[in-house]
Amino acid sequence: MESHAAPVGGPVCACCTEPAVIYQPVNKRHLCGTHIVCDVEARVASTIREAGQIRAGDRIAVGLSGGKDSTALLVILSRLLPSWPGAGLVAITVDEGIAGYRAETIRAAETLTGRLGVEHRIVSFCDLIGDDLDTLLAGREAQACTICGILRKKALTDAARAAGATAIATGHNLDDEAQSVLMNALRGDLPRLIRNTGTGRSAAFLPRIKPLAAIPEKEIAVYLFVQGLFSMLPECPYTNYALRAGIRTMLAGFENLHPGTMQHLVGSKKTIERYCAGTPVMGHLHRCRECGDPCSGDLCQVCRLRHSLGK
Ligand code: SF4
Ligand code: ZN
């Protein structure tokens, strides 16, 4: 990874006299290693508090891929946890079965949970559907992320329920959220754009929370790096099949030229949600006729996928 250390005589932190390690263009300020750590943790704490994402006594299932976002999420939640008396964490890693990629990230997840003393469970696509992702994708590589995303969500939800969790936390950051808004807008999929949040508490759904949703990806990398927690891990070999890959490059370019672009995109999603609250576009809750999971139609995505894969 490139060094984030400031050159001698370079900018100093806006909060102390230490050399800066990062510039936040939206706030127009430099921060040192100590203060970027405090700043990231304070913003995550405020996201959680403002949205009421965690309550005393909650058992939070953290989706832990072993990559940087979920690593930062678990570190931050384990530090913030004493704020909610009786709350606990369980980390869940989904092993999709991707050769040359997943084994190393699972090792990283095991090392981290061991160091933090957090219970760790690993569930696999083989357990869920009888095959690993590589086998399921033979000849369908272009659909990799769609198939993987549907099965991963199901595996994580089932594992979280089995672990007695009251909510699922995922490491989606600001860049991920902005990319999702743009992707759904480009697909013309308004219902999905506003339906995917699932932060409310209802009997049918385990609430899904995204405590890092206001933090840019770059700040998460620096947050880990300055604490010696950043490791270079392999990239999923299917990444380049994703529409997201192109959107990611394009949005990063816009953000560079026009700081705040990603925040504005995520903000526009919230505005649309407010306008659409209680309207038919939000969809009504049904039960899948085969598995009984909550869904928006007759069959859930997982059962539809099982049919198309002949499973
Ligand atoms: Fe799954 Fe796509 Fe992510 Fe790879 S890049 S882990 S296939 S969603
Ligand atoms: Zn179903």
Image (tube, rainbow, N blue to C red):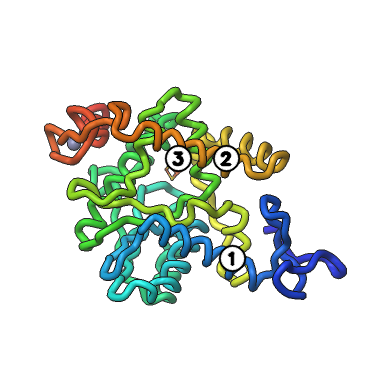
Ligand 2 found in image quarter = top left
| Circle 3 crowding by C-alpha within 10 Å: few under 14, some 14–19, many from 20 | some
Amino acid beneath label 2: His
User: What is the x, y in percent for residue 210?
Assistant: 42, 53
Q: Secondary structure at mark 3?
A: helix
Q: Is residue 127 left or right of residue 152?
A: left
Q: Which residue is mark 1?
A: 39
Residue extending furthest toward the top:
188
Q: Secondary structure at mark 1?
A: helix
Amino acid beneath label 1: Asp
Which mark lies nearer to you, 1 or 3? 3
Which of pointers 1 and 3 lies earlier in the amino acid sequence?
1
On the rendered image, what quadrant is the N terminus found in?
bottom right
Rendered image: mark on residue 270: 3
Rendered image: mark on residue 143: none
x 32%, y 27%: residue: 281
Q: Which residue is mark 2?
A: 264
Q: Secondary structure at mark 2?
A: helix
Q: CA distance from mark 2 to mark 1?
A: 20 Å
Choose top left, top right, bottom left or bottom right for residue 262.
Answer: top right
Amino acid beneath label 3: Lys
Q: Is residue 281 left or right of residue 193?
A: left
